[in-house]
Image (cartoon, rainbow, N blue to C red):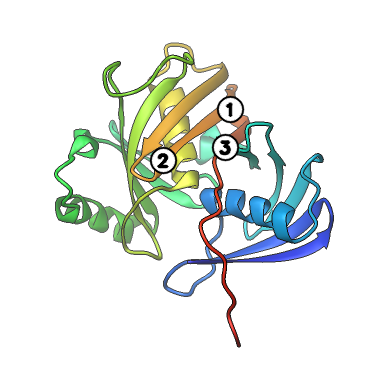
Amino acid sequence: TGIAVFAESPTRFEMKYYNSDGRIASFCGNGSRCAVRYFVTHCGGNADEQIAFKASDGEHVARVLSDGTVSVSLADVSIDSIQKLSDSMWLLDTGSPHVVVASSAVDDRDGDDSRLQRLCKPLRLQHNANVNLVAECTAAQGDKSNGAVVLRQKTFERGVEAMTLACGSGAVASALWWMLTRCAESVGQHSVCVQMDGGSVAVSAHIDRRQARAITLVGPAEFVFSGELCV
């Protein structure tokens, strides 16, 4: 995977995200947070200001928070646009399309993803979408000390064609699925923590009768290494 950042001003940039198959992805939540961090660190971006950026799916707003995590806004999701494929399976678009499947298979911790890939790949091909397996954690599995519901997620990603460590737009899709199907009262403001093999993120949104709005994805974006590519 790769991210190209094109700075336009201290508070605005454009991002292009490339999947490992070389194709441009419509949106990447985790990649967006990394792009914001890179923009602030290497392109003169102002960490004290709200930062706007354009991705393939449209405009977004981000901010580097006081604890070093990065918050990114996502476009509103119309309730009418969500397809209920079955009682345990939804198809929705959070910048990229995701099939969300309520499944206990997400708790499979034997380290072998081959069974999960066999489960996800037919759905990936049928719907041309990423596939998220998701389940609500028990009190013993997830830290609910902050009062947020905790979900566990594993994702088969389009463009990677395999299980991946984490998916930010997928975490948003899974969180919205929970807010709309498992919450006793869907209408209102909700927050969900989504745990993945690669780490955890927080998703918040306001749900009304017509749409999910004010959607934000918050999580870390940490420096790993630097290098130069000669072309």
Q: Amino acid at mark 3?
A: Leu
Task: Look at mark 2 in the image and give the residue it sits on.
Answer: 199
In-image side of 54 versus 159 (left or right): right
Dot 3: within a 10 Å radius of its alpha carbon, few (fewer than 14), some, or many (20 or more) residues? many
**Residue 103 x, y percent position in the rendering:** 23, 35
Q: Give the x, y percent position of residue 33.
A: 60, 48
Which residue does the image show at 33% across and 23% down from the upper left?
A: 142
Query: Circle 1: is it few (<14), some (14-19), or many (20+) Cα within 10 Å?
Result: many
Q: Amino acid at mark 2?
A: Gly
Label 2 secondary element: strand
Above or below, comparing residue 184 to residue 58 in the picture: above
- In screen coordinates, is 88 left or right of 151? left
Residue that sits furthest to the bottom in the current view: 231
Q: Give SS at disc 3.
A: strand
- Residue 70 versus residue 59 in the image, above or below: above
- In terms of image quadrants, where is residue 61? top right
In the rendered image, the residue lying farthest to the right is: 9
Q: Which mark is residue 106?
A: none
Which residue is depicted at the point 55% across and 48% down?
A: 222
Q: Nearer the viewer, mark 3 or mark 1?
A: 3
Q: Residue 217 bears which disc, if any? A: 3
Residue highlighted by disc 1: 205
- Looking at the picture, does residue 159 appear above or below residue 185? below
Question: Mark 1 falls on what kind of element?
Answer: strand
Residue in front for this viewpoint, 32 or 210 = 32
- The relative height of residue 98 versus residue 218 in the rendered view (above or below) is below
